[in-house]
Amino acid sequence: MGEGRVLRIPAAGRAEIVTEAVPDVADGRFRVETLYSGISAGTELTYLKGTNPYLRTSWDGGLGLFTDGEPAIEYPVTGIGYMQVGRVTESRTAAVSEGAVVAMTYGHRTVHVADPMSERFVELPGEIDPMLGIWVAHMGPICANGLLHAAHDVYGPAAGQLGDGVRGRRVAVTGAGVVGLLVTAFALEHGAAEVIVVDGTPSRRRAAEALGARALDPEAADAPLTVKQRWRHGPGDRGADVVFQCRGRPGALALALRLLRPQGTVIDLAFYTDGAEQVRLGEEFHHNGLGIRCAQIGRVPRGMAHLWDRERLSAETIGLLRARGSALREHLITEVAAFDDAPALLVELAERRRHAVQAVLSA
């Protein structure tokens, strides 16, 4: 039995690193020592802020309902995080060799002993920057799944390629955080005719432009008017073919609906911890016959699970990193901090005293 360090949230507004026991490597398992651990400024900070719905309600997985009762998760919350890259330092399984660099989702900790029968791991090719590997196991598949939902919206289960919903089409993205910028890169890589990213932060708009998209400031211009003046399909038919909504604010969803052409669809990848009271379903949603599809990583589109599992979505992510890794490294990873600095970093991000597109902990 050894020891490692793990990030813990003991209460709302606080974060700390504590020591935890690490079991010996039993037959069939392997030990990973963390190289990099990516911070999700969305999901993870909801635990720090105390806004995650799991902290206040009970989740019934069988019914698919949040219900009154004991909270699904209580403080202290240990081991949050789903963007880890580590090196295998001991292996007692033929599934992976010592020395391999793997992407996994075991939380912000320095050491992890994994069971390949119950945990996913993706071995990274040697030419991929290990720091970019933080997106391979989970975050990249989240974004790829958004494109898959767009493809399904056009072709149903007959969609054969990830880019079938964006190729040759005019695409808008609301929100230029990690999800929005990775979706932008995926859409451009898979042949979108044009991508417009709408975000209020200048540095994030610059990142979108560096990736090859156009960028609009929703505060400085009427984005829906600009988009609909630029993208004309026919009389009374203007706007984006598809919008990927990637910011967890109801105003962003309301904006996404206004960017669409009639009968278009918003592919929603956001997490609305406070609900979405600003979404006005009596306006463009109703009059233009629009659609909203939730694209969360727990489900690929109906009828496609036999073709598109998490492994294939990870493979698509590796393909994106091979093609555009240098640009993504330069423009998305904006903060690299030591693992021991994680508590202060998370608090500063939650309090908006520090801003990052993608923050990474280096162990």
Image: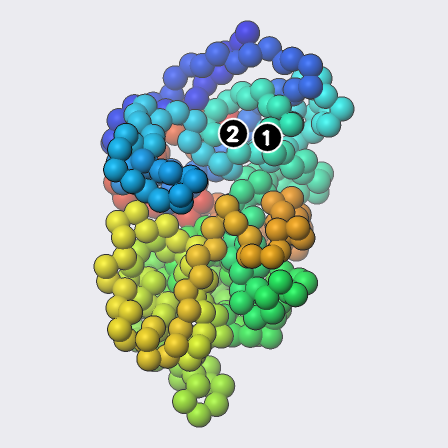
Q: Residue at x 50, y 46 (%)?
A: 298
Visible in this render: residue 223? no
How far from the left and from the top, in percent, is residue 135? Answer: 55, 43
Q: Which residue is mark 2?
A: 106
The residue most toward the bottom is 235
Distance of mark 2 from mark 1, alpha carbons?
A: 9 Å
The residue most toward the front is 63
The colouring scheme, among rainbow, by chain, secondary structure or one colour, is: rainbow
Q: Residue at x 34, y 63 (%)?
A: 253
The residue most toward the right is 94
Q: Secondary structure at mark 1?
A: loop
Looking at the picture, tell me which residue is in the foreground, 144 or 348.
144
Q: Is residue 349 above or below residue 141?
A: above
Q: Which residue is mark 1?
A: 119
How far from the left and from the top, in percent, is residue 317? Answer: 61, 49
Residue 285 figure quarter: bottom left
Q: Nearer the viewer, mark 2 or mark 1?
A: 1
Q: Is residue 93 left or right of residue 144?
A: right
Pointer 2: residues within 10 angstroms few (<14), some, or many (20+)? many
How far from the left and from the top, in percent, is residue 219? Answer: 27, 67
